[in-house]
Amino acid sequence: MQIDFIATPHKDTTTLVIFAAEGFSALHQGEYLSAADVAQLEKSLKINEFKGKKAEAQVFTAVGAYDRVVIIGLGKTEKLDALTIAEVGGAVYKVLAGLNVTAANVIVNTIEGNANTDAEIAGRIAYGAKLRSYRFDKYKTKEKDDNKKPKLEKLHIVVKEISAAQHYFEAKDAVAEAVFFARDLQNEPANVIYPASLAKAAKNALTPLGVSVKILGEAEMKKLGMNALLGVGQGSAHESQLVIMEYTGKGGSDAPLALVGKGVTFDTGGISIKPSANMEDMKWDMGGSAVVIGTIMALAKRRAKVDVVGIVGLVENMPSGTAQRPGDIVTSMSGQTIEVLNTDAEGRLVLADALWYCQKHHKPKAIIDLATLTGAIVVALGESTAGLFSNNDAMAAQIEKASKTVGEPVWRLPMNETYDKDIDCDFADMKNIGSGRGGGSITAAQFLQRFIEGDLPWVHLDIAGVTWAKKDGALVPKGATAFGLRTVEQFIRENFEG
Ligand code: BES
Ligand code: MN
Ligand code: ZN
């Protein structure tokens, strides 16, 4: 879908979108509708009991010169923050996509009692509409599906402050494009996206943007002693990979911020094999790596003044004659030994070496890792909210703030010595699962912390419950969400740029 900003409605469409806040105070968009039409619309809205609640929608046909007038609710004007406006934009897309139209003019006028400029409103509507317009339909080859395919091709945002709106949208569009790229990687099945193909996709997409991308294979990782990661991939026909992406928007002389992602391109559980029901969901187990790759893309596309290194550990966890066994003991790159009591607790093994490699080779000033790490986090927080773990209150608070701004909820869970002891082990330095039945997401986080040196600020986001969605959301259609990308991007924007 193409989005542009123009001063007066485009002639290529007779569909008009206008907004109405609760109590209709914003329905005075009379420059494109006659007073009589506005009065008629207000009357109809009343009859239909339209309240103007956020994302509430009504479609009227044959109004004045227009074939369709779509009215979208804004909610309470005093509650109209950046996120709400983007969500309203999502609703604009959703409603238009359900109509038989190829283009629409969206009228943005000053909303009274609200701090957003017209340009900001226009840009945010555009951003929300764009995020919501994502589709993954490349494998749908049959014609009959075309009926379901939205026909909307052009969204004209009609606003007075054109260049300011364009400028605002440009940076957001870079993020949206990166979100789409990450969602595509996540949505692809595991026969298409495996470690080497994922590494290549990252390299092909990021190199032209000026990101330096290095890919390590098994021989190189073996030399580095990354046996925790390699053990997970040793049952697979696909070679494990480590991808290192360096974006140096600030010149690269400072210590970078590091992003580390779990990239298990398919998680069967290995010899500790998972039940067959819903096993297909484990194609999403590379969600964290897609978010890391996508975040680097967003920063590079909008030329952020910041140095960031992204590292993703890519493996496929398969059972086979060469697979790792329960009880195997591996020596990680850090020198710490791990008894692998459950081959399905593989993400932490991958991250252990990726985190260590990151600290040894890049000396970051802080690390954020993203991983679909535990089923336990879904039990604890459900499918709307990611788990946050950290050794640093200030950084945790910064991530929480950014997550609120973009509408990707996170909730911090505790970490302490008691939980840490739970992974002490009789035969090695640690075991890869806890002893008890509860608190599985926390013991997983404690495991990761054993691979963080000293007090290096670190945040771990367990995105197992949120990396894909079973139903449509305000900004995300069902399927891959790229959850975490917009939070990390916002966190960087607020705390690391300049
Ligand atoms: N990839 C899974 C976690 C997961 C579960 C992600 C559900 C998304 C949805 C992870 O590798 C895993 O299998 N974790 C085990 C750990 C257990 C064996 C200690 C789990 O959560 O069951
Ligand atoms: Mn697993
Ligand atoms: Zn996994």
Image: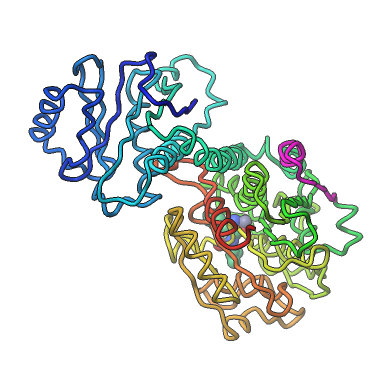
Residue 209, magenta (yes or no): yes
**How is colour applied across the structure in the image?**
rainbow
Specify whether 141 is left or right of 105.
Answer: right
The one of 329 and 86 positioned closer to us in this rendering: 86
Specify whether 307 is left or right of 27.
Answer: right
Residue at 52% across, 42% down: 172
Residue at 75% across, 61% down: 354
Quadrant of the displayed image that contains ligand 3: bottom right
**Residue 227 position within the rendered picture, expressed as x and y whole percent measured from the top left:** 82, 63
Residue at 40% across, 50% down: 83
Figure check: 417 above or below 216: below
**Residue 436 position within the rendered picture, expressed as x and y whole percent measured from the top left:** 54, 77
**Residue 301 position within the rendered picture, expressed as x and y whole percent measured from the top left:** 65, 41
What's the magenta region?
202-217
The one of 227 and 164 positioned closer to us in this rendering: 164
Residue 362, magenta (yes or no): no
Figure check: 378 above or below 280: below
Residue at 66% across, 56% down: 262
Quadrant of res 139: top right
Figure check: 45 above or below 494: above
Figure check: 48 above or below 411: above
Quadrant housing the C terminus: bottom right
**Residue 76 position within the rendered picture, expressed as x and y whole percent measured from the top left:** 23, 50
